[in-house]
């Protein structure tokens, strides 16, 4: 909810995203003038050049061999997906550059990725198959979200036919295996692939059992989990 309303609220309203709330979106928004503080303009949703904001970050700390207390969140950077055509039309019609609205929420964004990733892993595995190391971070009892989430290193590609994409993979050895979910939000854009380390499997027999379950997916023991 915090991401849907705080980080993406203006964009979701502008592009008519569905909502669980019974009341429909208001038909207009008051858009601030980015160069004149205090000036606003009522604008129909379909004309508001809102942006979808997201984060870029290093690979998950656990995959880099970092201590669980080493927090890379201060190095996360923000990026946006914008509709340049709508922006140009707005400026021609209303005569000013609009200010975009969103709330900076990197911690909650990381928790969102872990929640999605945990659900993705459970489409292939049962709860008892792995230690769900992500749960304390999802619940907020452990704060360093950057230890388990990160951005894949490959150049992001757009997947035109998909609204989102996710997949499960494993990384490790025959004695210790990490369960990782790759997640691409707004997959038809150039938003990066994220990874969420959701679980851990220890012991040769347990690792073998998990890999047997994953044999019919694109999952394997991988020596380069962040590529």
Image (cartoon, grey):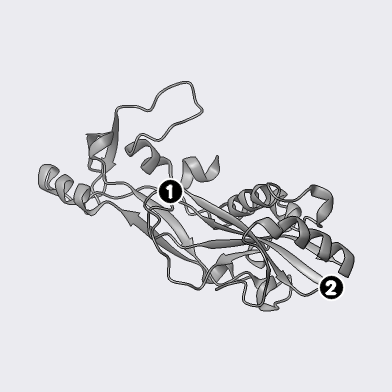
Q: Residue 63 carries which label?
A: none
Identify the mark nearer the N-term, 1 or 2: 1
Element assignment for label 2: loop
Residue positioned 70% across, 78% down in the render:
65
Residue linked to disc 2: 175
Instruction: Work out whether 153 lies above or below 54.
Output: below
Tag 1 residue: 162
Looking at the picture, tell me which residue is in the foreground, 82 or 36.
82
| Image location (x, y in percent) of residue 203 | 88, 68
Evaluate whether residue 203 shows in this view: no
Residue 94 is situated, as x and y percent measured from the top left of the image, at 14, 43
Query: Crowding at label 1, few (<14), some or many (≥20) Cα neighbours within 10 Å?
Result: few
Identity of the residue drawn at 86% across and 62% down:
206
Can residue 63 be spotted in the picture? yes
Residue at horizontal 84 percent and vertical 50 percent from the top: 128
Query: CB under 8 Å between callouts 1 and 2?
Result: no
């Amino acid at each position: 909810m915090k991401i849907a309303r705080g980080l993406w609220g203006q964009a979701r309203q502008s592009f008519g995203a569905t909502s669980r709330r019974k009341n429909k979106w208001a038909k207009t928004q008051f858009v601030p003038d980015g160069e004149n503080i205090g000036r606003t303009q009522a604008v129909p949703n379909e004309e508001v050049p809102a942006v979808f904001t997201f984060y870029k970050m290093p690979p998950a700390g656990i995959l880099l061999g970092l201590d669980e207390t080493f927090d890379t969140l201060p190095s996360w950077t923000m990026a946006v997906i914008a509709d340049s055509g709508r922006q140009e039309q707005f400026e021609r019609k209303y005569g000013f550059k609009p200010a975009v609205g969103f709330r900076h929420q990197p911690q909650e964004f990381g928790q969102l990725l872990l929640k999605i990733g945990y659900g993705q892993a459970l489409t292939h595995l049962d709860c008892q198959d792995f230690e769900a190391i992500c749960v304390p971070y999802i619940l907020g009892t452990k704060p360093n979200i950057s230890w388990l989430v990160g951005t894949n290193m490959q150049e992001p590609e757009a997947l035109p036919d998909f609204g989102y994409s996710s997949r499960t993979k494993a990384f490790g050895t025959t004695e210790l295996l990490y369960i990782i979910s790759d997640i691409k939000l707004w997959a038809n854009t150039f938003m990066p692939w994220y990874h969420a380390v959701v679980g851990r499997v220890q012991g040769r027999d347990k690792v073998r059992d998990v890999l047997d379950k994953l044999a019919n997916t694109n999952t394997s023991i991988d020596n380069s989990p962040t590529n």
